[in-house]
Every structure is written in C-alpha cells, then in structure tokens.
Image (cartoon, rainbow, N blue to C red):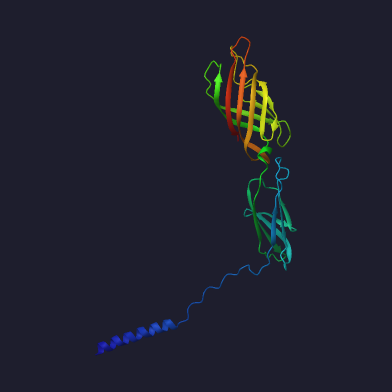
Amino acid sequence: MQQHRAIRLVLVLLLATACTKADEPEPSAASPSPTNAGRPSVGDLTIDEPAWNAAGSNWELRLTWDAPEGFDLDHYVVARNGIEVDDQVAGGRWTDRDVEPGARFSYRVTAMATDGTASRPAKGSIKTGTPSLDDARLEGSFIMTMHVDEATGTRDPVSGGAVIFRFDPTCGQGPCSVRWTVRDRQTDAVLPRDGGTYAASVSTPLFITNCFGTVIDESINVNLRVTAAAPVHGAWRATRIEGTVHERSSSSGCMSASIDWNVRGAVQT
C-alpha cells in the first residue's frame, strides 16, 4: 500500500511539473535589427555611354541621379564594382573616365547628410559596347603562324612555321595604313587600310632567294584582315589577324619560284 502511494505521489509531481512548464511564458523572439526602410533614397540612377571611338578619346561613362527627398544633403559617395572611387561628389552627376569598351561596370551612389547619416543608395550596372572591328588600330608585333598552300620552283622543301610581323601605323592615332616589316628579313612595305583589311601588291624581299642564295625583291600580294580587337593601352587595337601572302620571284638566269601562304596570328604581349 505504501509502495502504491509512492508511485501516485511521483505521478502527481510529474504532472505538476509538466503543467508548470506548459504555463511558463515562452522566451520572446529577438528584436528585429533596424532596417534602412525609413531612410530617403537616391533616385533614378542613369548611366550614359558614348559611341565608343577607336582612339580612346571619349572613353567615359556619365552618371546622373536624383537627390533624396527630405534629406539634409552634404555630398555623395560613388562606388564602382564594390569599391569607392569618389567620396566627395557635390552634385547629382559624375563622370567615370577610368572605363573601357567591352566591359561590365556596376555603380552605387549614396547620399551623405551633414550629420553623417547615409541614405539608401541608388544602384545600376552596364555592359559597355565596343567600337567597330573595322576601326581597330593595327599596331605592334604579331606572332604569325604560316602554312604553305603551294610552293613551286624552290630549291628546298618549304615547311612553314612561325615568324614575327611588325606593323607601324602611318598616323598618330586611330586606324590607318601601316608599314609592314618581318623580323630577320629585309621585308619593308606600306599596306593601305580599307576598313579592317590591309592589302597591297608590293615589291620587297621575303623568303625566296635567287639561284646564288641572294635575297632579291619579289612580287608579293598581301591580304590581311583584323579578326579580333580589344582595349590596349587606352585605344581600340587589333589583337588577331589572318589572311594570305603570295610571293613570286624570278631572276635573270634562274628559275622562277613561288610560295602561297595562309597566315594567322596574335599580337605579342
């Protein structure tokens, strides 16, 4: 009988404990962190880009925005791609001259009040356009791979390989005709520009020698075209070219020879 009373007493205590826990108030949820929902916002961020030229003289993006209403404005802070680039902008416009064509840029503009309070920012992004491929400036040294289509009259088999073409523009900036030279050769000729193509029939030495192993002028047809371009040193520059070079030579008392090349290459960095 005492044993039964002990069991009942334990049950009563357990029930009382359970009821007590059920009646206890639940812990309150953590107070939400303050938000910026009530702060004024910079409005209508607009990003204008130019018609990108090849010379790089107009490479800039122009940002404009509206001031936040009901805000004791002191200045603005502009960030590009997550990094502050100007923290003392006075008005509702700013020009970014550290940009280039064919790239993506994101901006954030925040207003700062006289007491140091920040507004909600305005955000925007842009993928910039590019100049025409035909307007790329052909300049510098290109590592060219040369493949033989056909060769006749040569003393030794012609296997092809890699050479360095050098292009020096005849103008100060932008696309124009180029002086064409070949490393370790006496090649020297001017190639007129027609859009993204550089073509000419010229008389200059290249790879063929006469029967006595002497370098001679050849009749050479050159036709090269720009196939890729990119911003290089603040200008729109050709980075890849391809085309054909046909060389023909004959010398008094020697058999005539010819080599037809397919060529392609990339600018040397």
Residue situated furthest top in the rendering: 253
Quadrant containing the N terminus in the rendered view: bottom left
Q: Position of residue 121 (x, y in %)?
A: 66, 61
Q: Position of residue 122 (x, y in %)?
A: 67, 60
Figure disc tally: 0
Q: Give above or below for 34 relative to 190.
A: below
Decide if residue 219 is in sight here. yes
Q: Nearer the viewer, residue 115 or 249?
A: 249
Quadrant containing the C terminus in the rendered view: top right
At 74% from the left and 58% from the top, the residue drawn is 92
Decide if residue 184 is in sight here. no
At 57% from the left and 28% from the top, the residue drawn is 262
Q: Position of residue 226 (x, y in %)?
A: 63, 35
Q: Nearer the viewer, residue 164 or 177?
A: 177
Q: Nearer the viewer, residue 67 or 125?
A: 125
Res 168 quadrant in image: top right
Residue situated furthest bottom in the rendering: 1
Residue situated furthest left in the rendering: 1
Q: Position of residue 38 (x, y in %)?
A: 65, 70
At 26% from the left and 88% from the top, the residue drawn is 4
Q: Give above or below for 150 relative to 72.
A: above
Res 40 quadrant in image: bottom right
